[in-house]
Image (spheres, coloured by chain):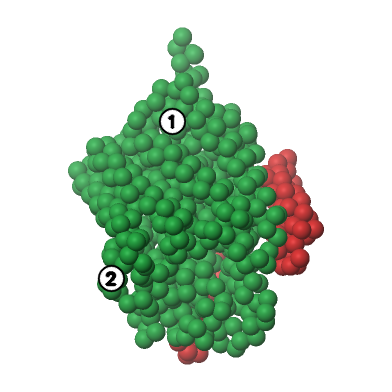
Chain colours: A red, B green
Amino acid sequence: MSARPAIPFGIWCVFLAVLAGVLAVWSQDPLPPILLGGASAATGLTALAVALRVRMGSGPNARANREHELIPDLSFFTFVVAVGLVAMAIGTVFGFWLVLVGIGTLAGGLLGLVRELYLGHKALEHTAANNRSRRGG
Amino acid sequence: MSTAARLVLPRPLSLLAGTDHKSLGLRIAVTAFVFFLAGGVLALLMRSNLASPTSQVVTPNTYNELFTMHGSTMIYLFVTPLALALGIYLVPLQIGASDIAGSRLALLSYWLYLGGGLTMYLGFFTSSGPGRAGWTAFDPLSNSANTPGSGMDLWIVGVTLATAGSFLLAACILATVVRRRAPQMTMLRMPVFSWTMLVTALMTVTSFPVLCLAMVLLFIERHLGGVFDSPGGPIAYQNLFWFYGHPVVYVMFFPFVGAVAEVVAVFSGKRFFGYRPVVLSLLAFTALSMSVWAHHMFATAQVANQYFSLTSTALVVPAGVEYFDLIATMWGGRIRLTAPMLFALGFILQFLIGGLSGIFIGSPPLDYHVHNSYFIVAHFHYTLFAGSVFALFAGVYYWFPKVTGVMLREGLGKAHFLLLMIGTSVTFIPMFFLGWEGLPRRVATYPPNFQALNIIASSGAIVIAVAIAVFLANVAASLYRRVPAGDNPWEGHTLEWLTTSPPPRHNFTAPLPTISSYAPLLDLKTAEMAHER
């Protein structure tokens, strides 16, 4: 499978690298070229990751578009994870007690997400098994 | 066939936990619009204070809070999330996908964004008040000695959360484009809007983490010190901040340019002119935009002025390509002056004014004269409000039928456009002259000789408020007395117009047609007409 989806990332990486190189010559402060060079490197790594995933067959195809069957229409525990993260963040202002509340909420949310994922996979396996037995029968 | 028989309110649990990308995009958009109204109220308070040179509608300290929260709301909480929300809703539909990649991550992003926004506003309830060091929070103004109190800390935490949410949304959009395109939808068959979302997401994921880093460091500086208190510390903060702060203005621009491109093509009855040059120019424009940030720092004399002036001026090349292609698309076309098209034309004219003023201040000697003055305020309001918000409304009027299944009232839409054009011009054109004559920004009072232009600007702000009220009335009337839209009321060219209005849970129930270009429905129509002949 062609790695064309990686091309925009690759173009960007090269463009940013050239700009970072010119800036490194012109700038007396090292921070600006470091920032721009870092952005180039990050984009280059993304291009590589995209190219590898596409070559491994994870690009656009029917299976990728069926992944929606693993995602439930409602994910309450994602909301719980968000509440935990926000509570932890606000806790840095209002006090450690709120950070602890946030950690507890986050832990509960993550456990709930793991359960959601597990149940989703079980449901998909069950459906696939039923389909196989119907075709065989 | 449209399924919009009547307005169906979402269940409370689906508002909290729904993973459908369309519902999510709508939630982000509505939340962002509520923040826009809040930011607008803050602006009206500012303009009330500025209507008179010695007016004390608010105290100077409160005025600092107003301009800080107004700018913060509009950038962190309104335009940026709304730009990404357009992508969350529309990109899967345009590329033939059944859903967004990383639905749970996108849901998490929404709650981080909303949590961040509410955290920022929580500062109003503290004894020290909310953040008041500008939306940029430059050190040392924003350190604990100069801006004490928990309100500023809450502002920092809120910005970090909202930015993290935006970052994750962009990551989902990137992953969707890479992994969820329909089998025939190659990269060079994606619609122009989807390309603008791709480059927007690229800028977001590379620059937004730097703002989160800057905010964390600022928080540490305020509580422990030792981060920015060296001689080069303030400049280091500005480099970190503006490395995010310039790309973000393009994050607030490109999705709406994409919307305008779609609107112009459809309402000219033609294919978009110069698709491949525009794709290349988008990549070049956004890469260049990552390397211009220190033009905000010319006056510090601590950055390479020649380099940043060169890259800033070079932006005119890809911008020119895009303008040329928009005009060429309309040239010789069968123009329909509907509300979306009027807003698109308004964007093209007004962004030109804002953009050209940007080239002007991209020259350091000219910038020295107008830096930190109302000229700068006029420049960024012309690009972001007169530009991006007009393009946003073009997109809203264009896609509202698809999202809701009903049409917005055309008459009210045109009234909204006319009022907003007048209000925008009356509010922001005087600011160019105010800045040129030397009125600095972020001041609660001013010398009496600036009063006349300030009164004109404040009057214009009231007209803008009336225009927004007309828009809200249009939405309410259209949702109450529903005129069904059908699947493709505008004869749109791209895949979202193939499915029902509003689209079903997984977007497409029927097989997709052959995709051989970025305008598959136009190709289908052309083939059908050729077959009939």
The chain to which mark 2 is attached is B
Of the pair A94 and B257, the residue shown nearer to us? B257
Q: Position of residue B478 (x, y in %)?
A: 24, 44
Q: CA distance from mark 1 to mark 2?
A: 49 Å
Q: Position of residue B72 (x, y in %)?
A: 44, 66
Q: Position of residue A84 (x, y in %)?
A: 48, 77
In the image, taking residue B268 as reference, residue A17 lies left or right, namely right
Tag of residue B55: 2
**Badge 1 and badge 2 in a common chain:** yes
Q: Is residue B266 visible?
A: yes
Which residue lies most toward the top here?
Answer: B533
Q: Secondary structure at mark 1?
A: helix
Of the pair A39 and B174, the residue shown nearer to us? A39
Q: In which quarter of the view is residue B279 placed?
A: top right
Q: Residue at x 53, y 61 (%)?
A: B371
Q: Secondary structure at mark 2?
A: loop
The chain to which mark 1 is attached is B
Q: Is residue B507 visible?
A: no
The image shows residue B141, relative to residue B404, as above or below, that is: below
Q: Amino acid at mark 2?
A: Ser
Q: Amino acid at mark 1?
A: Val
Q: Quadrant of the N terminus of chain B?
A: top left
Q: Give whichever of discs 1 and 2 has the lower sequence position.
A: 2
Q: Residue at x 48, y 42 (%)?
A: B352
Label 1: how many residues lie within 10 Å, few (<14), some (14-19) or many (20+)? many
Tell me the residue that label 1 is attached to.
B266
Of the pair B360 and A137, the residue shown nearer to us? B360
Label 2: how many residues lie within 10 Å, few (<14), some (14-19) or many (20+)? some
The image shows residue A93, relative to residue B119, as above or below, that is: below
